[in-house]
Amino acid sequence: MSATTPDAAQPSFARLPLGLTLNGQERQLEILPWTTLLDLLREQLDLVGTKKGCDHGQCGACTVLLNGKRVNACLTLAVMCDGADLVTVEGLANGEELHPMQRAFIKHDAFQCGYCTPGQICSAVGLANEGRAQTSEQIREGMSGNLCRCGAYNNIRDAIEEALPACMQGVGQGGGQ
Amino acid sequence: MNPFHYSKPDSVQDAVHLAGPASRFIAGGTNLLDLMKENVTRPEHLIDITGLPLREVSETARGGLMIGALVSNADLAWHPLIEQRYPLLSQAILAGASPQLRNMASTGGNLLQRTRCYYFYDASVPCNKREPGSGCPARDGLNRIHAIFGASAQCVATHPSDMCVALAALEAVVHVQGRGGARSIEFADFHRLPGEAPERDNQLADDELITAIELPAAGFADCSHYLKIRDRASYAFALVSVAAALKVVGPIIREARLVLGGVAHKPWRDKAVESWLTGKAPSRETFTAAADTLLQNAEPLEHNAFKVKLARRAIVRALSDAAQGGQPDE
Ligand SMILES: Cc1cc2nc3c(=O)[nH]c(=O)nc-3n(C[C@H](O)[C@H](O)[C@H](O)COP(=O)(O)OP(=O)(O)OC[C@H]3O[C@@H](n4cnc5c(N)ncnc54)[C@H](O)[C@@H]3O)c2cc1C
Ligand code: FES
Ligand code: FES
């Protein structure tokens, strides 16, 4: 899918410096002001785990963890992330060891086509970091910002319900430090 | 998105001095960037206000709270003082958008979010709000989600915010700062009806920045309820919403606040109905009579007459739930 931001060849607009921690690594980048965080990740950094579903904040496929909080990368300007600690789905695992939320998604078969899955998993880690949801009903409402066109909702909820206690105890908190 | 210049001031003074007709402040970006992607808004200059020191929630000398304009919707809804003293506001915020969006969205930005009218969002069709004088296709077009109160020949759009419906009921005050100085605006006067100038949603000037929202002491924590009716159970804008708050002493209503969302260009408050409720016993009959009186003045369009019926039931339910201590009776 193509970037929704204008052409990079805009002579009168200087590139802006952007310094952030991305999946645990310090990065110094230069970007045009209108680059969204989603386009930066996918088009410039080749981190294509974060998906572009609607590009309008309506589906959650682009969910990432900004300073430990889940946000929609499609409605975030990259330049506004200067100084931030950013974790994408690529940064959740600890080396070869998957994040508990990732393991639970596999165990519960919580996907079909898999397009929404990176956003679902990041959102679920964000939900755990918030520490508000406990019951199955609260998980459902707390995950309402992530649509799944395949309708894998029941398995997604089951996976989160199982992984939530471990995640809330701070095991592998994506970007929450 | 169109190309634009970007600056990030670190004081309110600098921010308002940078502002002009072709610039926009950006906070959470959840509405502004969406509109820029649709070419509905094309600012030449974005002023990033997220570096300003406007993130505090503090107690006021008058027993209320002062909420900085940059407090996120999620932080506000879950703030212990808001949950304890203004549960109506917590409920309204949590009924809106998604957890991701609430993490991003700011208190000030929520007030200034623009209508979700389909024609306003489609830059290829006329819309008086987007392009003054071009016409209003919604008046005789697809107007299922549009206004049943206070519309004009020029515009039938509604204001989409949930938070603002609760803020109207709580009689919040909006504090703003412009190049000429600071002023405060009663919530009821902040947003405007479309009239002859539907391009203006509110009475803020181009150089004015919202710095804080003040809540008065009265939070109606014992008897309030926010009820939102939408096309699906979550993550959708209100077709109709109701903020109901009561002060009940013994068998009698001593004070009532009743504000509707999703039905007008601004949160729709009917003070006559509120005074009528005062002194009555809280009963289903009382609440039904209040709803009927309020809705007498509704002016539905071709496709949204259902909102009148929906609002009637929602008002009765919200007031009943509020009278029972804010617990939904389901
Ligand atoms: C998919 C989706 C669903 C949504 N559902 C709901 C819903 O159900 N209920 C609901 O209430 N809302 C909903 N929203 C809207 C959301 O609440 C608003 O977009 C958000 O509150 C705007 O805040 P922001 O900080 O992101 O504003 P921004 O996008 O940053 O700014 C919005 C406007 O406010 C101006 N602005 C921002 N801060 C200030 C300030 N301090 N002073 C002066 N001007 C300022 C900007 O210039 C801009 O014009 C939804 C949004 C999306 C994308
Ligand atoms: S791509 Fe960001 S919410 Fe759909
Ligand atoms: S698994 Fe296909 S969209 Fe969710």
Image (cartoon, coloured by chain):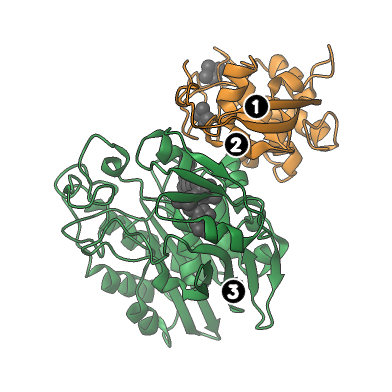
- Please say whether residue B171 is visible from this viewpoint: no
Q: Which chain is orange?
A: A
Q: Where's the N terminus of chain B, which quadrant?
A: top left
Measured Cα–Cα span from mark 3 to mark 1: 47 Å
Label 3 sits on residue: B219
Q: Is residue B163 above or below residue A54?
A: below
User: Do the numbered discs 3 and 2 sit on residues whose CB atoms are within 8 Å?
Assistant: no
3 or 1: mark nearer the eye = 1
Chain B drawn colour: green
Task: Point out which mark residue A30 bears.
Answer: 1
Q: Nearer the viewer, residue B105 or B18?
A: B18
Q: Are marks 3 and 1 on the same chain?
A: no
Label 2 sits on residue: A140
Amino acid type for the residue under numbered disc 3 = Gly
Label 1 sits on a secondary structure element that is: strand
Label 2 sits on a secondary structure element that is: helix
Q: Residue furthest front?
A: A12
- Residue B58 falls in which quadrant of the image? bottom right
Q: Under 8 Å from ligand 3: the CB of mark 2? A: no
Q: Nearer the viewer, residue A138 or A85?
A: A85
Query: In the picture provided, is A73 more to the left or to the right than A129?
Result: left
Q: Residues within 10 Å of mark 2 (few under 14, many from 20)?
A: many
> Closer to the N terminus: mark 1 or mark 2?
1
Subunit bearing disc 1: A
x, y (%) of residue A135? 69, 41
Q: Count the labels in the image.
A: 3
User: Do the numbered discs 1 and 2 sit on residues whose CB atoms are within 8 Å?
Assistant: no
